[in-house]
Amino acid sequence: MAGLGSTVLSAAAGRAAYAALSRRPPGGRDTWARTNHRGEQVTLVEGPAAAVAAVAVAAVTPGLPGRARAALAAAGAGAAAFGCYDDLAGSGDRRGFRGHLGALARGEVTSGAVKIVGIGAAGVTAAALLGGSPVDIVINAGLTAGGANLLNLFDLRPGRAIKVALAGSALLAAGAPGPARIVACRAIAGPAGAALALLPEDLAERAMLGDAGANALGGMLGAAAAASLPRTARITLLAGIAGLTAASEVISFTKVIEQTPPLRWLDMLGRRPAAGAAAPAAAGDQAAPPAADQGTEAGAWPPVVVPEQAAADFP
């Protein structure tokens, strides 16, 4: 039951932030509006709402060490800020680590390259706040930045990234050993509560996390793992994150999910019926055309008419 009160508080804060941002989105509604394949408008304010709630609650969660609260807040705020920048200012010309870093090598600074550097810096900051040996700081920075990136790679269909975030939260709470489990439960309370509260909006295709929300929630879960797991478990988790990130460059997570019945059932749970037959997934989800964070295949959550909003942007 550790962290239950903070989870409820985060859920309430997430709903309140979403309502407030929906009424008066910064820069006007058009700044955050996107049109999906159904001809319906969705909004990107879900992401900032989730990030604000998760960060605020993490910063005041009782029973967490001060260093852990500061690290969670830094991870969430930094990832949200650079993710939001990419959501609103992205050009869509380059995608993936290879695309953005290749452009950077040629002297072209893309929004994705800025996000790569920015989220990496947020990960280092969070790791430094947690403290420990230089080895621990490197591992924890990788977990934070890698978690931010990995969750974003799943944000290709309505509700998918939030479901992954909630599953990851549950696994972290169950897997943390001994007294560290209490720390883990309190550390995940902010991101898990905000994610759960905004899941209905995501599933109904009224709103989407965007890079701001997915990066923030993933970064905070990475920081929570860094704050609660022993070194061996953190190294194993970091290897898994790195492996999935590398795999995303050459395979489609969507295709794997659709070809695996239990995963497909979970992925479709709570979603609106498809509008049409799904087109084959491209190799590597990150290669999908960039507009809405939930991908491009017909009948799920196709692109919008504004450039570079794909989660695939990083990478």
Image: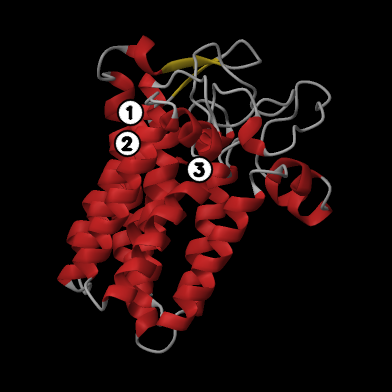
Spatial distance from mark 3 to mark 2, Cα to Cα?
13 Å
For the question of whether residue 4 can be seen, the reply is no
Q: Depth check: 13 or 116 in front?
A: 116
Whole-angstrom CA distance, mark 1 to mark 3, is: 14 Å
Circle 1 residue: 85
**Distance in Å between CA atoms under marks 1 and 2:** 5 Å
- Compare marks 1 and 3 and give the one earlier in the sequence: 1
- Tell whether 50 sits left or right of 237: left
- Determine the residue positioned at 29% across, 20% down: 23
Total number of numbered labels?
3
SS category of the residue bearing label 3: helix
**Residue at image point 65% right, 41% down:** 270
Mark 1 crowdedness (10 Å alpha carbons): few <14, some 14-19, many ≥20:
some
Residue drawn at x 48%, y 71% is 172
The amino acid type, in three-letter code, at marker 1 is Tyr
Residue type, mark 3 in image: Asn
Is 190 situated above or below 194? below
Circle 2 residue = 82
Q: Amino acid at mark 2?
A: Phe
Quarter the N terminus occupies: bottom left
Find out whether the residues at labels 1 and 2 contact each other: C-beta distance under 8 Å: yes
Q: Point out residue 291 in the picture as x, y percentages from the top left corner.
A: 54, 21
Quarter of the rendering containing residue 31: top left
Q: What x and y, as percent, mark residue 191?
A: 37, 54
Q: Which residue is mark 3?
A: 152
Q: Residue furthest front?
A: 106
The residue that appears at 61% across and 56% down in the rendered structure is: 244
- Residue 249 in view of the camera: yes
